[in-house]
Amino acid sequence: MARAPARRRLGATARRESILEVALAEFAAFGYDGTRVAQIASTVGVTEPVVFQNFGTKGELFAAVLERAAGHLAAHLDSLGRETSSVVDLLRRLLAPAHQDRMHRRGGLGVLFIEAAASSDPQLRRALQRAHARAAQAIARLLGRGQIEGSVRADVDPLSLAWLVLSQIHARQFRRAHGKSSPALEEDVLRSLLDALVPAGTRI
């Protein structure tokens, strides 16, 4: 009988990275309560105690995953910002209700932010604050590009505008979670947000 191939032994850094990436996918797919650390360990190819040796607790692992997700989001926005010819058109696509719904559906990075926001754990709340701050900085860099190109109003600092954008994303998910939304309303809200971001007199 043929023997199963031996698992490749990971170095400490590679092992931690593997745990984080697998945990990110698991938490996004199943939420905090529905994710089992044992399953993460099995997928990575380590034992459950190894996961806890690297991250301490399930809560600490989730906090690290949330910061990783914020990093992925920031890198993605930075990449899109370098490639786009119109920041406002890019924001229109990113903030469109259908795109937001995909981001916050099971498996999307937005699920991690929703899960952390619903938690009463102070550690997760602090991690959420850090993740929000990182996302806001990335959005501010994007809006700053828009100010340079003239498509975004320049009379308000980009970080303040970024927090406006973030607050709208959260408000959208709040309405969606409580079933108090409609396509027509969401389109009107998006148009109002974009109107607030562009220079006075600009047609959206």
Image (cartoon, helix red, strand yellow):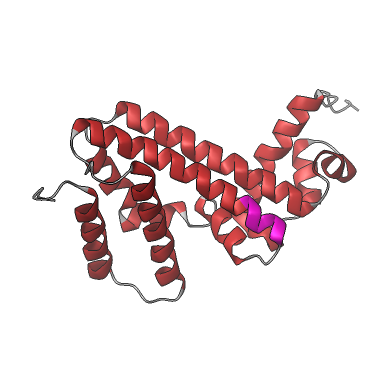
Please tell me whether residue 80 is drawn above or below residue 203 in the rendered image: above
Is 20 magenta? The answer is no
Q: Residue at x 86, y 25 (%)?
A: 6
Residue at 75% across / 49% down in the picture? 60
Q: Quadrant of residue 68?
A: top right
Residue 23 image offset from top left, x and y in percent: 69, 45
What kind of secondary structure does the magenta stretch mostly adopt?
helix
25 displayed left or right of 196: right
Indicate left or right for 76 with 147 as reference.
right
| Number of numbered labels in the structure image | 0
Where in the figure is residue 5, as x and y percent of width and height? 83, 24
Name the spot of residue 105 as percent of width and height, x first: 48, 57
Could you say which is closer to the camera, residue 196 or residue 155?
155
Horizontally, residue 56 falls left or right of residue 127, namely right
* Residue drawn at point x = 64 percent, y = 50 percent: 127
Above or below residue 63? Residue 115 is below
Image: 134 above or below 145: below
Residue under the image location 40 percent in, 57 percent down: 169
The magenta span reads: 122-127
Percent across and percent down for residue 42 are 80, 43
For residue 157, side relative to residue 121 (left or right) = left
Which quarter of the rendering shows the N terminus? top right
The residue nearer to you, when weighing 188 against 127, is 127
